[in-house]
Amino acid sequence: MYARVIGTGSFLPGNPVSNNDLAARGIDTNDEWIVTRTGIRSRYLAESGTNSSELGLIAAQRALAMAGVAAAELDLIIVATSTPDFIFPSTACLIQGRLGNKGAAAFDVQAVCSGFTYALGIAEKFIASGSHKKALVIGAEVFSRILDWNDRGTCVLFGDGAGAVVLEAAERPGILATAMHADGSQNGILNVPGQVCGGQVTGDPFLRMDGQAVFKFAVRVLAEIAEEVCAKSGIKAADVDWLIPHQANIRIIDATGKKLGIERERVIVTVDRHGNTSAASVPLALDEAVRDGRIQRGHKVLLEGVGGGFTWGAALLEF
Ligand code: UT7
């Protein structure tokens, strides 16, 4: 039994915020630096009070509408997020409640920017086992809430948004292979090392990153895991129709495509307009390319994520 994508959806809050807009807000940066180092030109930032569940809910509704599936039919809801609305209940339960579904298993996955690929791999295993038939997998983030707006090395890189897919059990492919890995010894190169304790924030509640260490790690593991899922499926990386890598930095995306022999025309890029939306970046890019007609039924699509933990994950699917 395969897990087949039968609907995609996404949502970006408000209006694009350009690099010049950030500079005008007093951040010591400029468009030329950000574009040259990252490829990012703008991002979307949710208004205060707008949470991951609200972004994820709209993305989910759009994916369900494309799939022609009613929320009541879902038996599994997984949300990948590192910026949940609450400590608990999970963002998945909040979205489930707003969708009006009762009874589906619902939980969050925390694998930072790899979260969507982890969640997709988990949902695929539920469906392939025969235990579940219709799954909603969402990546939703409000990373703007955990950015230190005085740290120009990180605050210009991230944005808010959500993407979702509906999966259905099917006899024809489907997700062909998935992989997930982590190396917890690298937890210090990208983290938010704070917590709420006794009603107070302890530690540091902002995103901290060793950019160059993350860059090197990302380029290596994105190529390795792409080769791994291709080998599991008996497909050469160069033969996939579309590569959708995590959207963090155009230089990481280009280096990965080059290593895999996939030219830029077959790589879906949204980082220029969305910035890095963490777990939302891959499903946002997937939905964009499905809706604009680039990704067609039967195409082989390679999705991959990399992020804090350190974690990395991938899925190769026949759309
Ligand atoms: O989901 C995974 C998330 N993270 C990533 O994928 C990030 C991976 N890493 C990167 O993309 C890059 O390392 C960055 C874009 C974050 C940084 O690029 P870099 O080439 O590694 O720059 P750097 O951190 O070494 O900084 C170079 C210079 C510094 O100035 P000095 O010390 O050389 O005078 C920084 O202070 O650039 C300066 N700088 C900035 N200048 C203008 C850092 N941030 C900014 C900024 N605007 N926003």
Image (cartoon, grey):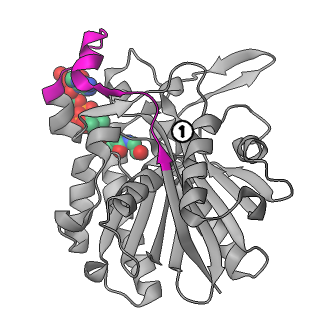
Above or below, 181 relative to 277: below
Expressed as whole percent of the image width and height from the top left, the position of residue 187 reads 53, 44
Start and end of the magenta stretch? 10-32
Tag 1: amino acid = Glu
Q: Residue at x 76, y 73 (%)?
A: 132
Q: Which residue is mark 1?
A: 141
Expressed as whole percent of the image width and height from the top left, the position of residue 100 reads 78, 48
Q: Residue at x 57, y 43 (%)?
A: 58
- Nearer-the-camera pick, 269 or 71: 71
Q: The N terminus lies in which quarter of the figure?
A: bottom right
Please give left or right for residue 95 compared with residue 267 in the image: right
Please give left or right for residue 295 compared with residue 89 in the image: left
Quarter holding ligand 1: top left
Mark 1 secondary-structure assignment? strand
| Quarter location, residue 265 | bottom left
Expressed as whole percent of the image width and height from the top left, the position of residue 141 reads 54, 38
- Nearer-the-camera pick, 188 or 145: 145
